Amino acid sequence: MRAYLIAAVLLALAIPVRGQAYMTDSGRAEFDSRVPLHTFTGTSDVLVGRISLPDSTVDFYLDLETLDTGIGKRDKDMKKTLETDTYPFAEFFGKLVSPFDPAGGTQPAVVRGTFTIHGHSQALEVTGTLEPTDDGLRLQAAWELNLDDYEIKPPKLLVMKVDPVQQMRISALLLPESESGT
């Protein structure tokens, strides 16, 4: 009988967490880009995202104007290549397809959806981790993005061309919506 009571209490505590949606407006997005003999990283700390556990939806977007590689001319060239005046955002919308236990520790997460950048959308599966914390959910994810899939022409200087395959990473602490001000 005592085991049933403990199980009922634990279940009651887990239900509000399962019904939660989590949000961030200060996540981190990074990409690694390569040219012969050189690699550079671009970053932004204004990744906006939401994970809704009740319907398993995941929605993240990034204002591409906020990307910074540490060199102004390279940033200007990158934004020209991405045509940020016309296509200012990158967005991923999908569904969490792996099981997730909000009472568990760090867990693998698989999300399937659509990634849109430069006016083109492609189906994408992203793997990473979700970790329940005292504050909310911590997300880490990484994938490869091929610029050719989105009709982005990698810039080149003489014979040196930017590799079309970019290594992408995101990380964020998502707070319960009621605490994030939404």
Image (spheres, rainbow, N blue to C red):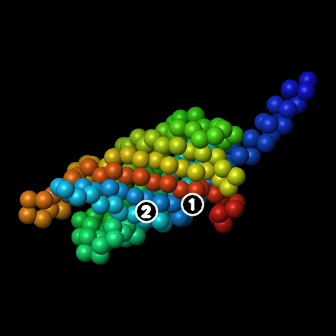
Expressed as whole percent of the image width and height from the top left, the position of residue 8 reads 83, 33
Q: Name the residue under label 2.
A: 62
Q: Name the residue under label 1.
A: 24
Q: In this view, does 78 lie above or below 97?
A: below
Expressed as whole percent of the image width and height from the top left, the position of residue 60 reads 48, 56
| 75 relative to 52 in the view: left or right | left
The answer to whether residue 4 is visible is yes
Specify the farthest residue to the left: 158
Q: Residue at x 21, y 53 (%)?
A: 163
Q: Residue at x 69, y 40 (%)?
A: 103
Marks 1 and 2, how far apart at CA: 12 Å
Q: Which amino acid does label 1 sit on?
A: Thr
The secondary structure type at the circle numbered 2 is strand
Specify the farthest residue to the top: 1
Q: Residue at x 26, y 70 (%)?
A: 74
- Which label belongs to residue 48? none
The answer to whether residue 119 is visible is no
Q: Dot 1: few (<14), some (14–19), or many (≥20) neighbours within 10 Å? A: many
Find residue 24 and report its image quarter. Answer: bottom right
| 129 relative to 29 in the view: left or right | right
Q: Dot 2: few (<14), some (14–19), or many (≥20) neighbours within 10 Å? A: many
Which quarter of the rendering shows the C terminus?
Answer: bottom right
Q: Nearer the viewer, residue 57 or 153?
A: 153
Q: In this view, does 156 lie above or below 20?
A: below
Q: What residue type is labelled 2?
A: Leu
How many labels were placed on the picture?
Answer: 2
Q: Which residue is drawn at 37% across and 52% down?
A: 168
Q: Is residue 115 above or below residue 96?
A: below
